[in-house]
Amino acid sequence: MTASVVVTGLGITAPNGLGTKDYWSATRVGKSGIGPLTRFDATLYPAKLAGEIDGFTPAEHLPSRLLPQTDRVTRLSLVAADWALADAGVSPADLPAFDMGVITASSAGGFEFSQNELRSLWSKGGEYVSAYQSFAWFYAVNTGQISIRNGMKGPSGVVVTDDAGGLDAVAQARRQIRKGTSLVVAGAVDALLCSWGWVGLHTSGRLSTVNEPGLAYLPFDDRAAGHVAGEGGALLILESADSARARGARVYGEIAGYAATFDGREPGLRKAVELALADADMAPSDVDVVFADAAAERELDRIEAEALVDVFGHRGVPVTAPKTMTGRLYAGSAALDLATAFLSMAEGLIPPTVHTEPADRYGLDLVGAQARTAEIRTALVLARGHGGFNSAMVLRS
């Protein structure tokens, strides 16, 4: 149960870059994908900005038979999985079906598909509702469609822990690899940018209603007014280190430690960090960068900052929040942060936290508008889900 588990492939769909190359090219220089919401008319809603993915044409990437049965989130997930497998140099057809699994996280499932079918129900009648509605809305649909497309019949599932889900899904994949599964596709993609999803997101009271893209999402800043929602995320290919070595795979790094707690107050997040470091057999001084949850809500920012200061000391480690360029992608956010951390390690570059002017009172060494060069051997990624989910994951190059 202690085998080293590594990441050999990345598949990224993000508002500031479709595909790993475009995403990293934008992120390393601080290019934001946040702007006015265009997928529907948001005029009457308080929040009018989002991180939207532009230029994604599903028919260019997927067979036509899949399009009528899939929501946007599933199409993005299928493409991210394809890219991750290609990046890892893996052809699923060459591997035993029961040696491969799929574990994803989701915050909502196929909301836009359901919205369109409900519109048909109300306006035309039940006979006009697609039979695919029976599963296209479901939280587990991304796991199911990826597994079917790639013939993956090993341990699979879905995790529903809001923004913490991306880390929790990868952690579950790590457990399955340690139990003997050869390969697991893991991570998360979310897409809630439809009018039904938008109503639901507003109920949290945490969406920023600032209409200037450069001022809307400012974590650890005295001007913080909530987060901007976005769509997308990342899927990763996990294998045992021995398996990756045997096939000569390129390795991004290791999932070295993980922990989760359930407590929305101060001790919960700090405890998750401490337990993740213990799981990785590391001291706080070993960590080279922290990828913050970065809620951009003053009380939540305070809790996160105090947890980091308690563990690492005042300005003890560089902290970054590249999600200020994409918005919070819900389950997809933490998975994208994992991918970003591996790309940071490869280049020796900590991506910026755009627009934010960090308040001194938080005591953080927040990487600002300019990226920072550094030798990065170990990264800590944090994520919190609404209601008290806390997750922490330690990555080692």
Image: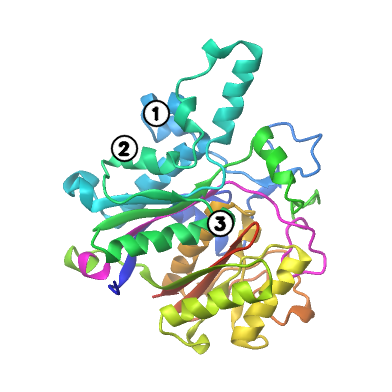
Label 3 vs 1, first from the N-terminus: 1
* Residue range highlighted in magenta: 215-243
Q: The residue under label 1 is which amino acid type?
A: Leu
Circle 1/circle 2 CB separation < 8 Å: no
Q: Is residue 54 toward the left or the right of residue 357 in the image?
A: left
Label 1 vs 2, first from the N-terminus: 1
Residue underneath mark 2:
148
Please tell me which residue lies in front, 25 or 382: 382
Q: Is residue 267 visible?
A: yes
Across and down, in percent, residue 226 comes to 75, 57
Across and down, in percent, residue 91 comes to 23, 48
Callout 3 environment at 10 Å: few (<14), some (14 to 19), or many (20+)? many
- The residue depicted at 60 percent of the width and 17 percent of the height is 120
Q: Name, please, the residue furthest toward the front.
A: 262
Q: The residue under label 2 is which amino acid type?
A: Ile
Q: Does residue 30 belong to the magenta stretch?
A: no
Across and down, in percent, residue 381 comes to 53, 69
Helix, strand or loop for disc 2: helix
Residue underneath mark 3:
333
Q: Is residue 392 visible?
A: no
Q: The residue under label 3 is which amino acid type?
A: Ser
Residue underneath mark 1:
66
> Is the residue 233 above or below the residue 55 in the image?
below
